[in-house]
Amino acid sequence: MTKRKSPMARYVRYYDVFSADGTRLRAWTNDAKGPTVLLANGLGTNPHSWPGLLNPDCGVRIVSWNHRGVGGSERPADKRVDLDSYIEDAIAVMDHAGIDSASVASWSAGVTVAFELAARFPERIDGILAVAGVPGDTYATMLAPFKIPPVVAKQIMANLTHAGKIGGTWAHPLSRSLPWTSLTANLLRYTRLIRPEANTEDLRILMQEFCRTDPGWYAHLALGILRQRRISLSGVRVPVTFVAGKHDILTGSRGMLTASQRIPGSRFVELAASHFIPIEFPELVTIELLDLVQRAENEKTAREFAVAKSANVKPIKKTPAREAAAKTVAAKNVATKKLVAATKGAAAHMPIQSSP
């Protein structure tokens, strides 16, 4: 059990946004100061999956939403939860918040959403942090630590998901009434789904919120993920960082490395972690996100100067807001140097320089 203190000053503000098809979404933000980051969360999860980003001084303003039928977001009238609907929801949240473009922090199934956004709306995505997830065909990388062939693993998990949709709703009264205390949260560690590094209180809050979702509806969401194919990465031209878990049984680390090798200049980080990296290593995830935001800002500024130069006009000057954002990120990076040194043995950092 980790002795790391849980953040005491958590902050989440919820509000409603309507997607393109009229579905009401429960959006949320940490209202922090700093560059804005869109967060594409793991399937059916909640803000408490990212305890490191719920601190007012985390250095970035997070804007996100709960998936359809989860955490206050309503189920669509036609029960549609395909990839198109996730993209529509993400764009609706960005438009409502007045976000022209931003980097995207993503986890698990949210990684597919992030890369699909970059493919469909490249002008709106500045960078991608992909945590424990691959760009599409997620089921094929499951059970990787057990050396199960991808085709077999995909079929096994698909069968389990179909079974969950059939019997999940009947189990909802039981799952909803589970008493999530420090004791039950610690018992969850014995399943090996979550590593000991996760703070007990963070884990308790996460699971308490997660279990309010109907398991049958969650399986319905998961079947939508099953139908998602691999996304082409040939057109990705923004900074990307992959953070993988060596012990992740839901997203194979090797699959993430392969994806990273297909993106020029991307960064690959492997932690001694499970699938729940944001709650096991929140400080390291925040560091990687701040680094990505800075890289994205640098590249965006360089592109603007290149365009100005080619057009033979006066170069674009940095705005006060942009300079303030850069200072916030830089200050946060300096403050976390000791943390990086202290956790040196927990991660293997490998910048990937792959060819297009």
Image (cartoon, grey):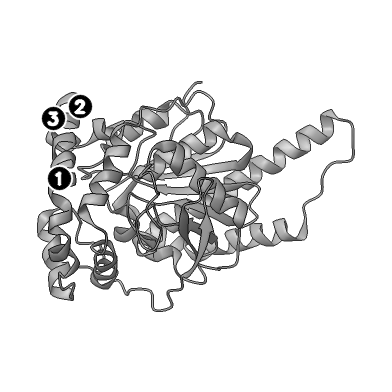
Sequence-wise first label, 2 or 1: 2
Image x and y of residue 167, in percent: 12, 49
Q: Is mark 2 on a helix, strand or loop?
A: helix
Q: Which residue position holds label 2?
A: 150
Q: Mark 3 points at which residue?
A: 148
Q: Is residue 274 visible?
A: no
Q: Nearer the viewer, mark 2 or mark 1?
A: 1
Question: Residue 105, relative to residue 62: is it above or below?
Answer: above
Q: Residue sitting at 57 percent across and 31 percent down?
A: 237
Between the C-alphas of marks 3 and 1, the distance is: 26 Å
The label on residue 166 is: 1
**In the picture shown, does residue 173 fall above or below 134?**
below
The answer to whether the residue labelled 3 contacts the one labelled 1, judged by CB atoms less than 8 Å apart, is no
First along the sequence among labels 3 and 1: 3
Residue 284: percent from the left, percent from the top?
Answer: 39, 57
Q: What residue type is labelled 1?
A: Ile
Residue lying at 40% horizontally and 55% vertically, measured from the top left: 285
> In the rendered image, which quarter is residue 261 located in?
top left
Q: Do the residues under discs 2 and 1 have CB atoms within 8 angstroms?
A: no
Q: Are marks 2 and 3 in contact (CB under 8 Å)?
A: yes
Between 339 and 62, the residue placed more toward the observer is 62
Residue placed most toward the observer, 185 or 146: 185
